């Protein structure tokens, strides 16, 4: 549903941010 999509998008954003931070450390 919509909530699942939002949670998925938020989780992906958090994961992407973590990867970006790690790669530019």
Image: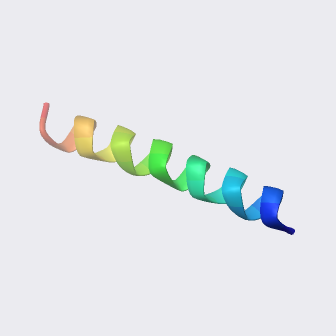
Single out the residue that lies furthest toward the top: 25
Give the quadrant of residue 1: bottom right
Q: Tell me residue 24's x, y (percent).
A: 12, 39
User: Is 1 positioned to the left or the right of 13 in the image?
Assistant: right
Q: Farthest left residue?
A: 24
Q: Residue at x 39, y 51 (%)?
A: 16
State the residue lying farthest toward the front. Answer: 2
Q: Residue at x 53, y 55 (%)?
A: 12
* Side of 18 relative to 12 (left or right): left
Q: Image height check: is 25 above or below 13?
A: above
Above or below, 18 against 5 in this view is: above
Q: Residue at x 47, y 50 (%)?
A: 13
Residue placed most toward the observer, 5 or 11: 5
| Number of numbered discs | 0
**Residue occupying image coordinates x 59% and y 58%:** 9
Quadrant location, the C terminus: top left
* Left or right: where 24 falls relative to 16: left
- Identify whether 21 is placed above or below 16: above
Colour logic: rainbow
For the view shown, which residue lies furthest in the bottom direction? 1
Tell whether 3 sits left or right of 15. right
Residue 22 at what x, y percent from top left? 25, 36
């Amino acid at each position: 549903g919509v909530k699942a999509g939002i949670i998925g998008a938020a989780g992906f954003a958090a994961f992407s941010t973590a990867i970006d931070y790690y790669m530019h450390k």
